[in-house]
Amino acid sequence: MRRSTTFRTMSALAMAGTMAAGTVMAGGDRDQNDRRGAVAKNVIFFVGDGMGVSTITATRVYSVGVAGNLVVDQFPYTALSRTYSADSITPDSAPTMTAMMTGANTNAGVIGLDDSTEFLDFNGDGDGRRLTTLLEQAKRGGMKVGVVSTARITHATPAATFAHINDRNDESSIARQALPGDSAYNDQLGDGIDLLFGGGRQFFVPNTVVDEEGGSGSRTDGRDLRAEFRGKGYSYVWNTAGFNNLTTRSLPVLGLFERGHMEYEYDRASDAGGEPSLTDMTLKAIDLLKNGQARRGQKSGYFLMVEGGRIDHAHHEGNALRALHDAQELDRAIGAAVRAVDLRDTLIIVSADHSHVFNIAGYPLRPLNEMPYPVRSFDPGYASLAGNGILDVVYDVNTATGHVEPSGDANGVPYSALVYANGPGYRGATRVDPRTDTFRGRNGIVPNGPAHEAYFQESAVPMGSETHSAEEVAIYAIGAGSDLVRGTVKNTFIYRVMARALGF
Ligand SMILES: [Zn+2]
Protein backbone atom coordinates (compact mmCIF):
# COMPACT_ATOMS: atom_id res chain seq x y z
CA MET A 1 0.00 0.00 0.00
CA ARG A 2 1.40 3.37 -1.01
CA ARG A 3 1.01 6.34 1.26
CA SER A 4 -2.45 7.76 0.64
CA THR A 5 -4.09 11.06 1.45
CA THR A 6 -6.59 9.31 3.68
CA PHE A 7 -3.82 7.60 5.59
CA ARG A 8 -1.87 10.84 6.01
CA THR A 9 -4.99 12.50 7.39
CA MET A 10 -5.34 9.75 9.94
CA SER A 11 -1.70 10.02 10.93
CA ALA A 12 -2.14 13.75 11.36
CA LEU A 13 -5.13 13.13 13.59
CA ALA A 14 -3.13 10.72 15.67
CA MET A 15 -0.27 13.15 16.00
CA ALA A 16 -2.58 16.03 16.89
CA GLY A 17 -2.95 14.34 20.27
CA THR A 18 0.79 14.35 20.91
CA MET A 19 1.70 15.86 24.27
CA ALA A 20 4.84 17.55 25.51
CA ALA A 21 7.85 15.31 25.93
CA GLY A 22 8.33 13.73 29.35
CA THR A 23 11.52 13.46 31.31
CA VAL A 24 13.99 10.90 30.06
CA MET A 25 16.51 9.97 32.70
CA ALA A 26 19.98 9.46 31.24
CA GLY A 27 20.89 5.80 31.54
CA GLY A 28 17.66 5.14 33.39
CA ASP A 29 14.86 2.75 32.71
CA ARG A 30 12.65 4.89 30.54
CA ASP A 31 9.57 2.76 30.91
CA GLN A 32 9.58 3.67 34.62
CA ASN A 33 10.11 7.36 34.03
CA ASP A 34 7.79 8.35 31.25
CA ARG A 35 4.60 9.72 32.71
CA ARG A 36 2.75 11.10 29.74
CA GLY A 37 -0.64 9.61 29.13
CA ALA A 38 -2.86 10.09 26.10
CA VAL A 39 -6.05 8.20 26.85
CA ALA A 40 -7.29 5.39 24.62
CA LYS A 41 -10.71 3.81 24.78
CA ASN A 42 -9.59 0.83 22.70
CA VAL A 43 -6.30 -0.97 22.15
CA ILE A 44 -5.49 -3.33 19.29
CA PHE A 45 -2.22 -5.21 19.69
CA PHE A 46 -0.87 -6.96 16.60
CA VAL A 47 1.85 -9.58 17.04
CA GLY A 48 3.74 -11.00 14.07
CA ASP A 49 5.06 -14.25 15.52
CA GLY A 50 8.71 -14.43 14.49
CA MET A 51 8.39 -11.23 12.44
CA GLY A 52 11.91 -9.89 12.81
CA VAL A 53 13.18 -6.84 10.96
CA SER A 54 14.67 -8.98 8.16
CA THR A 55 11.22 -10.53 7.64
CA ILE A 56 9.66 -7.07 7.40
CA THR A 57 12.30 -5.94 4.88
CA ALA A 58 11.86 -9.07 2.76
CA THR A 59 8.06 -8.77 2.95
CA ARG A 60 8.28 -5.18 1.76
CA VAL A 61 10.41 -6.14 -1.27
CA TYR A 62 8.15 -9.12 -2.00
CA SER A 63 4.89 -7.19 -1.82
CA VAL A 64 5.52 -3.53 -2.74
CA GLY A 65 9.17 -3.41 -3.84
CA VAL A 66 12.24 -2.24 -1.94
CA ALA A 67 11.22 1.44 -2.11
CA GLY A 68 7.54 0.81 -1.38
CA ASN A 69 5.77 1.19 1.93
CA LEU A 70 4.06 -1.43 4.01
CA VAL A 71 1.26 -0.20 6.28
CA VAL A 72 3.54 -0.37 9.32
CA ASP A 73 6.16 1.73 7.49
CA GLN A 74 3.66 4.59 7.65
CA PHE A 75 3.15 4.49 11.41
CA PRO A 76 4.47 7.64 13.12
CA TYR A 77 6.07 6.00 16.18
CA THR A 78 8.60 3.17 16.24
CA ALA A 79 11.01 1.63 18.70
CA LEU A 80 13.33 -1.35 19.05
CA SER A 81 12.26 -4.07 21.46
CA ARG A 82 14.72 -6.36 23.27
CA THR A 83 13.27 -9.85 23.51
CA TYR A 84 15.53 -11.87 25.85
CA SER A 85 13.69 -13.96 28.43
CA ALA A 86 14.54 -14.23 32.12
CA ASP A 87 16.63 -17.34 31.44
CA SER A 88 17.55 -17.20 27.73
CA ILE A 89 19.40 -14.92 25.32
CA THR A 90 17.14 -16.11 22.50
CA PRO A 91 13.55 -16.56 23.67
CA ASP A 92 10.45 -18.51 22.68
CA SER A 93 6.97 -17.03 22.45
CA ALA A 94 5.81 -18.00 25.96
CA PRO A 95 8.00 -15.59 28.00
CA THR A 96 8.00 -12.85 25.35
CA MET A 97 4.22 -12.71 25.01
CA THR A 98 3.99 -12.92 28.81
CA ALA A 99 6.34 -9.92 28.95
CA MET A 100 4.29 -7.93 26.45
CA MET A 101 0.98 -8.82 28.16
CA THR A 102 2.01 -8.45 31.83
CA GLY A 103 5.06 -6.17 31.94
CA ALA A 104 7.10 -8.93 33.63
CA ASN A 105 9.77 -11.09 32.02
CA THR A 106 9.71 -14.83 32.65
CA ASN A 107 11.37 -18.11 31.61
CA ALA A 108 11.36 -20.27 28.49
CA GLY A 109 8.14 -22.21 28.02
CA VAL A 110 6.35 -20.43 30.90
CA ILE A 111 3.09 -18.52 30.42
CA GLY A 112 1.68 -15.92 32.82
CA LEU A 113 3.77 -16.93 35.85
CA ASP A 114 6.76 -15.02 37.23
CA ASP A 115 10.45 -15.76 36.68
CA SER A 116 10.85 -17.98 39.73
CA THR A 117 8.80 -20.51 37.72
CA GLU A 118 10.68 -23.15 35.71
CA PHE A 119 9.25 -24.90 32.65
CA LEU A 120 7.33 -27.91 34.04
CA ASP A 121 8.71 -26.98 37.48
CA PHE A 122 11.85 -29.02 36.73
CA ASN A 123 13.44 -27.95 40.02
CA GLY A 124 10.42 -29.28 41.89
CA ASP A 125 10.16 -26.11 44.01
CA GLY A 126 6.68 -25.10 42.92
CA ASP A 127 5.53 -22.33 40.60
CA GLY A 128 6.09 -18.65 41.22
CA ARG A 129 3.62 -15.80 41.41
CA ARG A 130 0.76 -15.53 38.99
CA LEU A 131 1.03 -12.40 36.83
CA THR A 132 -1.85 -10.18 35.72
CA THR A 133 -2.39 -9.77 31.99
CA LEU A 134 -3.59 -6.64 30.25
CA LEU A 135 -6.53 -8.65 28.91
CA GLU A 136 -7.56 -9.54 32.48
CA GLN A 137 -7.26 -5.89 33.51
CA ALA A 138 -9.35 -4.83 30.52
CA LYS A 139 -11.99 -7.41 31.38
CA ARG A 140 -12.07 -6.27 35.01
CA GLY A 141 -12.46 -2.70 33.80
CA GLY A 142 -15.63 -3.63 31.96
CA MET A 143 -14.10 -3.66 28.47
CA LYS A 144 -14.80 -6.29 25.87
CA VAL A 145 -11.79 -8.47 25.04
CA GLY A 146 -10.89 -10.54 22.01
CA VAL A 147 -8.09 -12.90 20.96
CA VAL A 148 -7.44 -13.68 17.28
CA SER A 149 -4.69 -15.88 15.87
CA THR A 150 -3.94 -17.95 12.80
CA ALA A 151 -2.15 -20.38 15.13
CA ARG A 152 -3.94 -22.70 17.56
CA ILE A 153 -5.81 -20.42 19.97
CA THR A 154 -4.16 -22.36 22.82
CA HIS A 155 -0.64 -21.83 21.37
CA ALA A 156 1.87 -19.84 23.44
CA THR A 157 1.26 -16.36 22.02
CA PRO A 158 -2.55 -16.22 22.21
CA ALA A 159 -2.48 -18.29 25.43
CA ALA A 160 -0.31 -15.68 27.17
CA THR A 161 -3.20 -13.20 26.93
CA PHE A 162 -5.40 -15.34 29.21
CA ALA A 163 -3.58 -18.39 30.67
CA HIS A 164 -1.17 -19.13 33.53
CA ILE A 165 0.80 -22.37 33.25
CA ASN A 166 4.37 -23.66 33.52
CA ASP A 167 4.10 -25.71 30.32
CA ARG A 168 3.21 -24.02 27.04
CA ASN A 169 2.65 -27.45 25.46
CA ASP A 170 -0.24 -28.40 27.77
CA GLU A 171 -2.81 -26.94 25.41
CA SER A 172 -5.64 -29.16 26.69
CA SER A 173 -5.35 -27.44 30.08
CA ILE A 174 -4.92 -24.01 28.49
CA ALA A 175 -8.27 -24.47 26.72
CA ARG A 176 -9.97 -25.17 30.08
CA GLN A 177 -8.55 -21.96 31.56
CA ALA A 178 -10.73 -20.03 29.06
CA LEU A 179 -13.91 -22.04 29.75
CA PRO A 180 -16.17 -20.25 32.26
CA GLY A 181 -17.22 -22.49 35.15
CA ASP A 182 -14.46 -25.07 34.61
CA SER A 183 -12.49 -26.05 37.72
CA ALA A 184 -9.36 -24.80 35.88
CA TYR A 185 -11.08 -21.59 34.72
CA ASN A 186 -9.10 -18.37 35.09
CA ASP A 187 -11.64 -16.38 37.11
CA GLN A 188 -9.75 -13.17 36.37
CA LEU A 189 -11.57 -13.39 33.04
CA GLY A 190 -14.91 -12.61 34.71
CA ASP A 191 -17.76 -13.85 32.54
CA GLY A 192 -15.28 -14.93 29.86
CA ILE A 193 -13.30 -13.77 26.85
CA ASP A 194 -15.81 -12.15 24.53
CA LEU A 195 -14.28 -13.32 21.27
CA LEU A 196 -11.84 -16.10 20.34
CA PHE A 197 -10.93 -16.75 16.68
CA GLY A 198 -8.19 -19.15 15.63
CA GLY A 199 -7.20 -22.76 15.08
CA GLY A 200 -6.63 -25.51 17.62
CA ARG A 201 -9.99 -27.32 17.56
CA GLN A 202 -8.19 -30.54 18.51
CA PHE A 203 -7.81 -29.31 22.10
CA PHE A 204 -11.58 -28.79 22.34
CA VAL A 205 -12.52 -32.25 20.95
CA PRO A 206 -12.08 -35.72 22.54
CA ASN A 207 -9.54 -38.03 20.90
CA THR A 208 -12.36 -40.49 20.18
CA VAL A 209 -14.28 -37.96 18.09
CA VAL A 210 -13.79 -36.81 14.50
CA ASP A 211 -14.31 -33.07 14.03
CA GLU A 212 -16.23 -31.12 11.37
CA GLU A 213 -13.36 -31.25 8.86
CA GLY A 214 -12.51 -34.92 9.46
CA GLY A 215 -9.66 -34.36 11.93
CA SER A 216 -9.34 -36.19 15.24
CA GLY A 217 -9.51 -34.56 18.64
CA SER A 218 -6.63 -34.62 21.13
CA ARG A 219 -8.41 -34.46 24.50
CA THR A 220 -7.84 -37.51 26.66
CA ASP A 221 -10.48 -36.53 29.24
CA GLY A 222 -13.42 -37.31 26.94
CA ARG A 223 -14.74 -33.75 27.15
CA ASP A 224 -16.13 -31.83 24.18
CA LEU A 225 -15.34 -28.21 24.94
CA ARG A 226 -17.19 -27.03 21.84
CA ALA A 227 -20.44 -28.12 23.53
CA GLU A 228 -19.33 -26.83 26.93
CA PHE A 229 -18.58 -23.36 25.55
CA ARG A 230 -22.00 -23.39 23.86
CA GLY A 231 -23.48 -24.35 27.23
CA LYS A 232 -21.93 -21.18 28.65
CA GLY A 233 -23.66 -19.04 26.03
CA TYR A 234 -20.93 -18.93 23.36
CA SER A 235 -21.73 -18.96 19.66
CA TYR A 236 -19.49 -21.62 18.12
CA VAL A 237 -18.39 -21.50 14.46
CA TRP A 238 -15.87 -23.61 12.56
CA ASN A 239 -15.93 -22.50 8.91
CA THR A 240 -16.33 -19.48 6.64
CA ALA A 241 -20.10 -19.89 6.38
CA GLY A 242 -20.56 -19.78 10.16
CA PHE A 243 -18.06 -16.93 10.42
CA ASN A 244 -19.94 -14.87 7.83
CA ASN A 245 -23.20 -15.34 9.75
CA LEU A 246 -21.80 -13.86 12.98
CA THR A 247 -23.47 -10.60 13.98
CA THR A 248 -23.14 -8.12 16.81
CA ARG A 249 -25.67 -10.31 18.68
CA SER A 250 -23.37 -13.35 18.52
CA LEU A 251 -21.10 -12.47 21.47
CA PRO A 252 -19.53 -14.23 23.20
CA VAL A 253 -18.11 -16.22 20.30
CA LEU A 254 -15.66 -19.10 19.85
CA GLY A 255 -14.41 -19.63 16.28
CA LEU A 256 -12.13 -22.64 15.71
CA PHE A 257 -11.41 -22.85 12.00
CA GLU A 258 -8.90 -25.69 11.87
CA ARG A 259 -7.97 -28.84 13.80
CA GLY A 260 -4.42 -27.53 14.30
CA HIS A 261 -3.02 -24.20 13.19
CA MET A 262 -5.05 -22.41 10.54
CA GLU A 263 -3.75 -22.70 6.98
CA TYR A 264 -0.92 -20.53 5.79
CA GLU A 265 -2.40 -17.62 3.86
CA TYR A 266 -0.64 -19.07 0.81
CA ASP A 267 -2.66 -22.31 1.16
CA ARG A 268 -5.90 -20.92 2.58
CA ALA A 269 -7.99 -21.31 -0.57
CA SER A 270 -7.49 -25.09 -0.44
CA ASP A 271 -9.00 -25.53 3.06
CA ALA A 272 -11.81 -28.10 3.38
CA GLY A 273 -14.31 -26.05 5.36
CA GLY A 274 -13.10 -22.67 4.20
CA GLU A 275 -11.28 -20.27 6.52
CA PRO A 276 -11.53 -16.52 7.00
CA SER A 277 -8.31 -14.59 6.36
CA LEU A 278 -6.53 -12.75 9.16
CA THR A 279 -7.93 -9.52 7.71
CA ASP A 280 -11.47 -10.97 7.73
CA MET A 281 -11.06 -12.05 11.37
CA THR A 282 -9.60 -8.68 12.40
CA LEU A 283 -12.44 -6.67 10.85
CA LYS A 284 -15.10 -8.99 12.26
CA ALA A 285 -13.51 -8.83 15.71
CA ILE A 286 -13.42 -5.02 15.66
CA ASP A 287 -17.06 -4.85 14.56
CA LEU A 288 -18.28 -7.30 17.20
CA LEU A 289 -16.22 -5.87 20.06
CA LYS A 290 -17.14 -2.28 19.17
CA ASN A 291 -20.81 -2.78 18.35
CA GLY A 292 -21.70 -6.04 20.07
CA GLN A 293 -24.28 -6.19 22.81
CA ALA A 294 -22.83 -5.33 26.18
CA ARG A 295 -22.99 -8.03 28.79
CA ARG A 296 -23.77 -7.27 32.42
CA GLY A 297 -21.62 -4.47 33.76
CA GLN A 298 -19.79 -3.86 30.47
CA LYS A 299 -18.84 -0.36 29.45
CA SER A 300 -17.68 0.64 26.02
CA GLY A 301 -14.13 0.04 24.86
CA TYR A 302 -12.26 -3.10 23.92
CA PHE A 303 -8.89 -4.80 23.95
CA LEU A 304 -8.08 -6.97 20.94
CA MET A 305 -4.95 -9.03 20.36
CA VAL A 306 -4.37 -10.22 16.78
CA GLU A 307 -1.55 -12.62 16.01
CA GLY A 308 -0.13 -13.45 12.59
CA GLY A 309 0.90 -16.75 14.12
CA ARG A 310 2.34 -18.63 11.18
CA ILE A 311 5.12 -16.35 9.98
CA ASP A 312 7.10 -18.17 12.66
CA HIS A 313 6.03 -21.64 11.50
CA ALA A 314 7.01 -21.06 7.87
CA HIS A 315 10.45 -19.87 9.03
CA HIS A 316 10.85 -22.96 11.24
CA GLU A 317 10.07 -25.00 8.12
CA GLY A 318 12.76 -23.11 6.20
CA ASN A 319 10.20 -21.89 3.65
CA ALA A 320 10.47 -18.13 3.19
CA LEU A 321 7.64 -17.86 0.65
CA ARG A 322 4.95 -18.74 3.18
CA ALA A 323 6.53 -16.57 5.89
CA LEU A 324 6.48 -13.53 3.58
CA HIS A 325 2.96 -14.28 2.42
CA ASP A 326 1.70 -14.47 6.03
CA ALA A 327 3.59 -11.30 7.00
CA GLN A 328 2.02 -9.53 4.03
CA GLU A 329 -1.42 -10.67 5.20
CA LEU A 330 -0.72 -9.39 8.72
CA ASP A 331 0.24 -6.00 7.29
CA ARG A 332 -3.00 -6.02 5.27
CA ALA A 333 -4.98 -6.77 8.45
CA ILE A 334 -3.25 -3.87 10.21
CA GLY A 335 -4.18 -1.55 7.33
CA ALA A 336 -7.80 -2.70 7.54
CA ALA A 337 -7.81 -2.02 11.28
CA VAL A 338 -6.38 1.49 10.81
CA ARG A 339 -9.21 2.29 8.43
CA ALA A 340 -11.87 0.72 10.69
CA VAL A 341 -11.15 2.60 13.93
CA ASP A 342 -10.99 6.19 15.13
CA LEU A 343 -7.33 6.77 15.92
CA ARG A 344 -8.24 9.59 18.31
CA ASP A 345 -9.55 7.04 20.79
CA THR A 346 -7.78 3.85 19.68
CA LEU A 347 -4.16 2.76 20.07
CA ILE A 348 -2.82 0.34 17.46
CA ILE A 349 0.50 -1.19 18.37
CA VAL A 350 2.42 -3.77 16.34
CA SER A 351 5.41 -5.87 17.35
CA ALA A 352 6.90 -9.35 17.28
CA ASP A 353 7.73 -11.84 20.00
CA HIS A 354 11.17 -12.62 18.55
CA SER A 355 13.11 -12.78 15.31
CA HIS A 356 14.44 -15.69 13.22
CA VAL A 357 17.86 -16.57 11.78
CA PHE A 358 16.60 -15.35 8.40
CA ASN A 359 18.69 -13.11 6.19
CA ILE A 360 18.93 -11.22 2.91
CA ALA A 361 22.33 -12.05 1.47
CA GLY A 362 24.63 -10.67 -1.20
CA TYR A 363 23.99 -7.50 -3.19
CA PRO A 364 20.84 -8.21 -5.22
CA LEU A 365 20.30 -5.73 -8.03
CA ARG A 366 16.90 -4.03 -8.16
CA PRO A 367 14.47 -5.21 -10.87
CA LEU A 368 14.97 -3.99 -14.42
CA ASN A 369 12.06 -1.52 -14.32
CA GLU A 370 13.47 0.12 -11.17
CA MET A 371 16.99 0.68 -12.46
CA PRO A 372 18.17 4.31 -12.62
CA TYR A 373 20.54 3.72 -15.56
CA PRO A 374 20.08 1.82 -18.85
CA VAL A 375 20.65 -1.92 -18.57
CA ARG A 376 21.47 -3.09 -22.11
CA SER A 377 22.44 -6.69 -21.59
CA PHE A 378 21.38 -9.30 -19.06
CA ASP A 379 20.85 -13.02 -18.49
CA PRO A 380 17.20 -13.82 -19.29
CA GLY A 381 16.17 -14.56 -15.68
CA TYR A 382 16.84 -10.98 -14.66
CA ALA A 383 13.93 -9.62 -16.73
CA SER A 384 11.41 -11.58 -14.64
CA LEU A 385 12.79 -11.60 -11.10
CA ALA A 386 10.66 -13.60 -8.65
CA GLY A 387 9.28 -11.59 -5.74
CA ASN A 388 10.77 -8.32 -7.03
CA GLY A 389 14.20 -9.93 -6.68
CA ILE A 390 13.87 -11.26 -3.14
CA LEU A 391 12.78 -14.83 -4.03
CA ASP A 392 15.34 -15.29 -6.77
CA VAL A 393 19.05 -15.87 -7.13
CA VAL A 394 21.11 -12.75 -6.59
CA TYR A 395 21.82 -10.86 -9.82
CA ASP A 396 24.49 -8.21 -10.04
CA VAL A 397 25.95 -6.06 -12.76
CA ASN A 398 29.37 -6.96 -14.13
CA THR A 399 30.99 -3.53 -14.05
CA ALA A 400 33.55 -4.51 -16.71
CA THR A 401 30.93 -5.37 -19.33
CA GLY A 402 27.67 -3.81 -18.09
CA HIS A 403 26.10 -7.29 -18.30
CA VAL A 404 23.71 -8.39 -15.52
CA GLU A 405 24.24 -11.99 -14.40
CA PRO A 406 23.88 -14.11 -11.27
CA SER A 407 26.43 -13.44 -8.53
CA GLY A 408 28.59 -16.42 -7.70
CA ASP A 409 29.85 -17.81 -4.40
CA ALA A 410 33.58 -18.52 -3.86
CA ASN A 411 33.26 -21.31 -6.44
CA GLY A 412 31.25 -19.25 -8.92
CA VAL A 413 27.95 -20.98 -8.06
CA PRO A 414 24.85 -18.72 -7.91
CA TYR A 415 23.02 -18.34 -4.60
CA SER A 416 19.59 -17.10 -3.54
CA ALA A 417 18.96 -13.77 -1.81
CA LEU A 418 17.17 -15.39 1.15
CA VAL A 419 19.05 -17.75 3.46
CA TYR A 420 18.76 -19.18 6.96
CA ALA A 421 21.63 -19.65 9.39
CA ASN A 422 20.22 -23.09 10.25
CA GLY A 423 17.27 -25.33 9.44
CA PRO A 424 16.04 -28.03 7.04
CA GLY A 425 17.61 -26.36 3.98
CA TYR A 426 21.17 -27.57 4.66
CA ARG A 427 22.61 -28.90 1.37
CA GLY A 428 25.78 -30.55 2.63
CA ALA A 429 29.30 -29.70 1.56
CA THR A 430 28.60 -29.09 -2.13
CA ARG A 431 26.00 -26.52 -3.04
CA VAL A 432 24.57 -26.09 -6.52
CA ASP A 433 22.73 -23.39 -8.50
CA PRO A 434 19.34 -22.87 -6.74
CA ARG A 435 17.62 -22.72 -10.12
CA THR A 436 18.51 -26.34 -10.91
CA ASP A 437 18.81 -27.64 -7.33
CA THR A 438 16.98 -30.97 -6.85
CA PHE A 439 17.18 -30.83 -3.03
CA ARG A 440 13.77 -31.95 -1.76
CA GLY A 441 11.64 -29.26 -0.12
CA ARG A 442 8.26 -29.25 1.67
CA ASN A 443 6.45 -32.60 1.57
CA GLY A 444 9.44 -34.15 -0.20
CA ILE A 445 8.73 -32.22 -3.39
CA VAL A 446 11.62 -31.31 -5.70
CA PRO A 447 11.19 -27.58 -6.31
CA ASN A 448 11.61 -25.74 -9.55
CA GLY A 449 13.87 -22.90 -8.42
CA PRO A 450 14.03 -20.67 -5.32
CA ALA A 451 10.56 -19.13 -5.81
CA HIS A 452 8.84 -22.53 -5.89
CA GLU A 453 6.30 -23.12 -3.10
CA ALA A 454 8.17 -26.21 -1.84
CA TYR A 455 11.62 -24.58 -1.79
CA PHE A 456 13.70 -24.64 1.38
CA GLN A 457 16.07 -21.69 1.46
CA GLU A 458 19.66 -22.83 2.05
CA SER A 459 20.95 -23.05 5.59
CA ALA A 460 24.47 -23.19 7.01
CA VAL A 461 23.76 -25.60 9.89
CA PRO A 462 21.57 -28.71 9.48
CA MET A 463 18.57 -28.65 11.81
CA GLY A 464 15.12 -30.20 11.48
CA SER A 465 13.55 -26.93 12.55
CA GLU A 466 15.09 -23.51 11.87
CA THR A 467 15.49 -21.45 15.05
CA HIS A 468 14.59 -18.08 16.51
CA SER A 469 17.23 -15.38 16.83
CA ALA A 470 18.14 -13.01 19.64
CA GLU A 471 18.20 -9.68 17.80
CA GLU A 472 15.85 -6.79 18.56
CA VAL A 473 12.44 -6.61 16.90
CA ALA A 474 10.53 -3.49 15.90
CA ILE A 475 7.52 -1.84 17.55
CA TYR A 476 5.22 0.32 15.39
CA ALA A 477 2.44 2.42 16.88
CA ILE A 478 -0.27 4.82 15.78
CA GLY A 479 -3.24 6.45 17.49
CA ALA A 480 -4.04 7.42 21.07
CA GLY A 481 -1.03 7.05 23.34
CA SER A 482 1.29 5.88 20.55
CA ASP A 483 3.76 8.73 21.13
CA LEU A 484 5.31 6.81 24.02
CA VAL A 485 6.81 4.34 21.56
CA ARG A 486 10.42 5.35 20.86
CA GLY A 487 14.00 4.38 21.67
CA THR A 488 15.33 0.97 22.56
CA VAL A 489 13.21 -0.77 25.17
CA LYS A 490 12.64 -4.14 26.79
CA ASN A 491 9.53 -5.86 25.41
CA THR A 492 7.83 -5.38 28.81
CA PHE A 493 7.57 -1.71 27.79
CA ILE A 494 4.82 -2.64 25.32
CA TYR A 495 2.62 -3.64 28.25
CA ARG A 496 3.27 -0.29 29.91
CA VAL A 497 2.37 1.66 26.77
CA MET A 498 -0.94 -0.20 26.46
CA ALA A 499 -1.72 -0.06 30.17
CA ARG A 500 -0.98 3.66 30.35
CA ALA A 501 -3.07 4.38 27.27
CA LEU A 502 -6.00 2.64 28.95
CA GLY A 503 -5.41 4.41 32.26
CA PHE A 504 -4.59 1.23 34.23
ZN1 LIG B 1 8.81 -20.23 16.85
Image (cartoon, grey):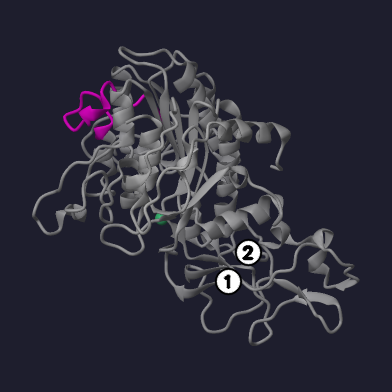
Which one is in front, 498 or 391?
498
Q: Eyeballing the image, is 395 above or below 189? A: below
> Is any part of residue 156 visible from this angle?
no
Q: Residue at x 47, y 20 (%)?
A: 290
Q: Eyeballing the image, is 94 above or below 318? A: above
Q: Are marks 2 and 1 in contact (CB under 8 Å)?
A: yes
| Segment colored magenta | 176-196
Residue named by callout 2? 447
Q: Identify the disc placed on residue 439.
A: 1
Query: The C terminus appears in which quarter of the rendering?
Result: top left
Q: Residue at x 45, y 16 (%)?
A: 292
Q: Residues within 10 Å of mark 1 (few under 14, many from 20)?
A: some
Give x and y (percent) for residue 279: 56, 34
Q: Earlier in the sequence, mark 2 or mark 1?
A: 1
Query: The N terminus appears in which quarter of the rendering?
Result: top right
Which one is in front, 40 or 463?
40
Give x and y (percent) for residue 7: 66, 34
Q: Is 389 positioned to the left or the right of 165 in the image?
A: right
Q: Is 59 positioned to the left or the right of 301 in the image?
A: right
